[in-house]
Structure formats: C-alpha cells, structure tokens
Amino acid sequence: MDTHGLVRDWVAVFNTGDASRADQVVSEAFVEHATAPFSQDTPGRVDGPVHLTEASSWLRAQFPDLRMEIEAIVAERDTVAVLVTSTGTNRGPLNDVIPATERTFSARQSHWFRVEDGRLAEHWATRDDLSTMLQLGIVSRPVVG
C-alpha cells in the first residue's frame, strides 16, 4: 500500500471507529510519541493495531461525531505527514477526567509517521490543543485590564 493510502486508512479509523484493518495500517512494533492533553507521559512502544483501536475508541467515546478532514498529505522517503482539521462535539468525559461540555471544537493537527515494511511504525503529532480547550470551555481566556 502506498503511504498516502496508509494515512487515509489511519484517518478513516478515527472517522468511522472501524479498526478492522488496523493490522494492515500500523505495525505491531509501533512507537507512539504523541500525548493526550493533560497526559503525564507518552506511551512509547506499543502494539500498533491494539493502540490504534483503543485510541480511536477512546476519542470517539469523548467525541462521537469526531471527524478528521485531510487537507494535505506529504511523503518523502520513510516519512509521511498529514495535515487535518478535526471537529467534534464533546459528549463524553474529556480524557476520562472532565465531565462532557456538550460544546464543539474545530482545530488543525499535523500527524507525522515513519513507515517501515509497508505500515505506519512511528507517530508524532502537533495539535492545537489550546484552541480546542478554549472552544470546549475547559480553559478560559485571560482577562486583560
């Protein structure tokens, strides 16, 4: 499978919640560098298909209408990056800690992957978590003056 297709399939897992092809998208020896907001540490080496399935289920429990729209995919050698705009309504406990806000968010994210043996093998993310938290009412804008 081409790298663009791998990333499209990775995004589709989050958009649909269907992880039936996770073992074809991510490697078993997967390294996760991205952390959830308020997380204390990164998962590190994980079972890729299990991790993708659990991450998708965890996010969709918080945002049942989660949608990632792909804006661009760029690949070079063993690296592929995707720029997405993510949207959703917070209807479940945020990070299993904060009660649902019932508010919506829209924020850009970039996800970077290292590809090995035709599967995604390593992941980094740059997300606009501050805008998301502001939109969800988790943090407040500072009062000036």
Image (cartoon, helix red, strand yellow):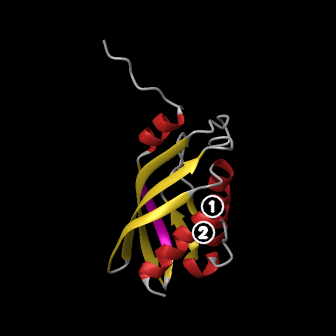
62 to 82, vertically: above or below: above
* Residue at mark 1: 56
* Horizontal and vertical percent position of residue 28: 61, 75
* Horizontal and vertical percent position of residue 113: 43, 69
CA separation in Å, label 1 and label 2 = 7 Å
* Horizontal and vertical percent position of residue 44: 54, 59
* Horizontal and vertical percent position of residue 63: 62, 50
Q: Any magenta on residue 125?
A: yes
Q: Any magenta on residue 10?
A: no
108 to 93, vertically: above or below: below
Q: Is residue 144 left or right of residue 63?
A: left
Q: Residue, x 57% and y 39% (percent of image)?
A: 103
Can the viewer see residue 87 in this picture?
yes
Task: Give the numbered dot on residue 13.
Answer: 2
Q: Amino acid at mark 1?
A: Ser
Nearer-the-camera pick, 97 or 135? 135
Can the viewer see residue 47 in this picture?
no
Splitting the image into 4 quarters, where does residue 142 fall? top left
Q: Is residue 77 left or right of residue 138?
A: left
Query: Would you say the magenta stretch is mainly helix, strand or loop?
Result: strand
Rendered-image quadrant of the C terminus: top left
Q: Amino acid at mark 2?
A: Val
**Magenta segment:** 121-126
Element assignment for label 1: helix
Neighbourhood count class around disc 1 (C-alpha, 10 Å): few under 14, some 14–19, many 20 upward = many
59 to 9, vertically: above or below: above
